[in-house]
């Protein structure tokens, strides 16, 4: 399988090169050159398959240069937690993606990618420097996913004062091969600095840089697994589901589209955002206008210029009408998000984190539209991807529901550790100098 850049100006590359480079040399993002199909035998007994079975079969389509046995071992190691599909009734489901070590769905990408990098680089003697901008959850998943992995250094940039206390502790207390840089700016500033570093000739001569953001194709591959696993758990061959994806950089939604390209049945997708709503606006008007990011209570989705938008456009060959038919957009304010948390808690005794609650709001809006359109409640199952554990957003949720939330043990451990970080001004030159001093 070859990978090509969305900008179409760079040569096709192997999986190893696409994964280790992150961004293509022409500034585009890598996507598979063709779409292998899962066979009918895969679908015939999909309902009996485990997440690990699915993970192996799906990744085998996209990963070259790693033998079956090692790939299986990696998959089993990565997917060592459950991914339950919880029913809220009336054909609404929640796919809980937060049972990994950092309690957010980004564990899938980070755990898979770290092991891919390690396997693909086993003969190299130079350390790889992973550079990642994070609005919170990416960083903690990357820190955990790569912690102690041989031959790899990790450098995380996060916006100072704009991540939650728990997120900051997760980012800054990992130690070992993980460094945290606190940037006096927004997430978009962090992302811009990282992008600049990747295209900086001097830096690239001095060190081998790679990304761990959702621009990396190796992060998206494991995110296809759970879409299939949701369909497997649904066991409803007559009604392909619609997936509602709380989105920021749109890596998660892109992975769903990729799964669909390999044959996964889906009635469509709902792009759910907070007030950082450039994609829902685009779906409405056909115009894509990136904006500075705004702060919200679903802060992992505070993205004003979603990096995976280029992939989505490419997957639809730029055909806006096609996109509009398949992706339904909706956006929500903080107060609507709080209301959704409250409503789900009182109606279903189910606690949603703010990101998942944005997804819930979008599904409710979709159902109202569906009823207007079809005149009754349609039988399409709606699956909300639940991207984080509510305890990660304790500060936001507790006042809303008027009750305390228990923090799971695996989250508690980092809260007692000493924060260790370096503050950088919002200037690319500062990052460059720090990298040269630190890794050269
Ligand atoms: C990163 C993140 C998102 C957004 O995912 P994208 O792939 O960037 O669209 C949503 N919810 C949570 C909790 C996240 O950490």
Image (cartoon, rainbow, N blue to C red):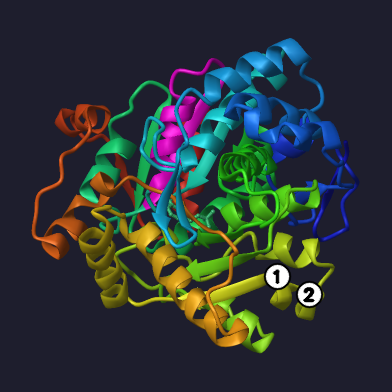
What residue does disc 2 label?
Answer: 322
Q: Which residue is pictured at 76% across the width and 78% down the height?
A: 320
Q: Position of residue 18 (x, y in %)?
A: 76, 39
Front-lying residue, 44 or 180? 44
Front-lying residue, 211 or 119? 119
For residue 295, which quarter of the picture?
Answer: bottom left
Asked if residue 147 is among those painted magenta in the image, a careful observer would answer yes
Disc 2 crowd, CA 10 A, few/some/many (<14, 14-19, 20+): few
In this rendering, position of residue 245 left or right of residue 341 = right
- Quarter of the image with the N terminus in it: top right
- Asked if ligand 1 lies within 8 A of label 1, the reply is no
Q: Which circle marks residue 13 in the picture?
A: none
For residue 216, which quarter of the picture?
Answer: top right
In this rendering, position of residue 22 left or right of residue 25 = left
What residue does disc 1 label?
Answer: 326
Q: Position of residue 306 (x, y in %)?
A: 57, 65
| Above or below: residue 7 compared with residue 31 | below
**Does the residue at mark 2 contact the one at mark 1 (Cβ under 8 Å)?**
yes
**Tag 2's secondary structure?**
helix
Figure label count:
2
**Tag 1's secondary structure?**
helix
Q: Which residues are magenta?
A: 137-158
Q: Which residue is pictured at 27% across the width and 52% down the height?
A: 350
In this rendering, position of residue 191 left or right of residue 65 = left
Mark 2 → mark 1, Cα distance in angstroms: 7 Å
- Quarter of the image with the C terminus in it: top right
| Above or below: residue 30 compared with residue 434 | below
Is residue 293 at least partly visible in the picture?
no
């Amino acid at each position: 399988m070859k990978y090509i850049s969305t900008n179409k100006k760079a040569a096709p590359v192997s999986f190893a090169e696409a994964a280790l480079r992150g961004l293509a040399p022409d500034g585009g993002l890598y996507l598979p050159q063709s779409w292998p199909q899962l066979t009918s035998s895969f679908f015939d007994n999909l309902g009996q398959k485990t997440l690990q079975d699915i993970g192996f079969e799906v990744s085998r389509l996209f990963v070259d240069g790693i033998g079956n046995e090692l790939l299986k071992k990696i998959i089993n190691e990565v997917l060592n937690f459950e991914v339950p599909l919880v029913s809220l009734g009336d054909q609404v489901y929640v796919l809980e993606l937060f049972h990994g070590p950092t309690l957010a769905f980004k564990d899938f990408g980070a755990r898979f990618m770290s092991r891919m990098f390690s396997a693909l680089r086993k003969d190299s003697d130079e350390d790889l420097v992973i550079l990642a901008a994070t609005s919170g959850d990416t960083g903690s998943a990357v820190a955990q996913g790569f912690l102690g992995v041989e031959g790899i250094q990790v450098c995380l940039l996060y916006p100072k004062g704009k991540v939650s206390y728990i997120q900051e502790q997760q980012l800054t207390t990992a130690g070992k091969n993980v460094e945290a840089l606190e940037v006096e700016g927004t997430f978009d500033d962090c992302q811009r600095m990282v992008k600049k570093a990747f295209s900086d000739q001097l830096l690239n001569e001095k060190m081998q840089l790679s990304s761990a953001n959702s621009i990396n194709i190796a992060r998206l591959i494991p995110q296809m697994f759970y879409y299939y696993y949701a369909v497997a758990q649904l066991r409803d061959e007559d009604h392909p589901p619609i997936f509602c994806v709380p989105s920021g950089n749109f890596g998660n939604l892109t992975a769903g589209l990729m799964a669909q390209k390999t044959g996964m049945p889906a009635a469509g997708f709902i792009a759910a955002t907070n007030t950082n709503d450039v994609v829902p606006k685009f779906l409405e008007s056909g115009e894509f206008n990136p904006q500075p990011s705004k702060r919200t209570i679903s802060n992992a989705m505070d993205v004003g210029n979603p990096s995976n938008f280029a992939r989505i456009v490419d997957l639809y060959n730029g055909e806006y009408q096609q996109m509009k038919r398949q992706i339904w957009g909706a956006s929500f304010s903080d107060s609507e998000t709080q209301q959704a948390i409250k409503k789900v808690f009182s109606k279903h005794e189910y606690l949603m984190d703010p990101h998942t609650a944005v997804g819930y709001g979008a599904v409710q809006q979709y159902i109202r539209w569906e009823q207007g359109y079809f005149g009754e409640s349609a039988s399409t199952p709606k699956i909300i991807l639940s991207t984080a554990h509510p305890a990660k957003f304790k500060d936001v949720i507790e006042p809303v529901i008027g009750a305390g939330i228990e923090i799971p043990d695996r989250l508690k451990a980092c809260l007692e550790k000493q924060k260790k970080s370096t503050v950088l001004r919002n200037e690319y030159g500062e990052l460059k100098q720090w990298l040269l001093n630190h890794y050269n």
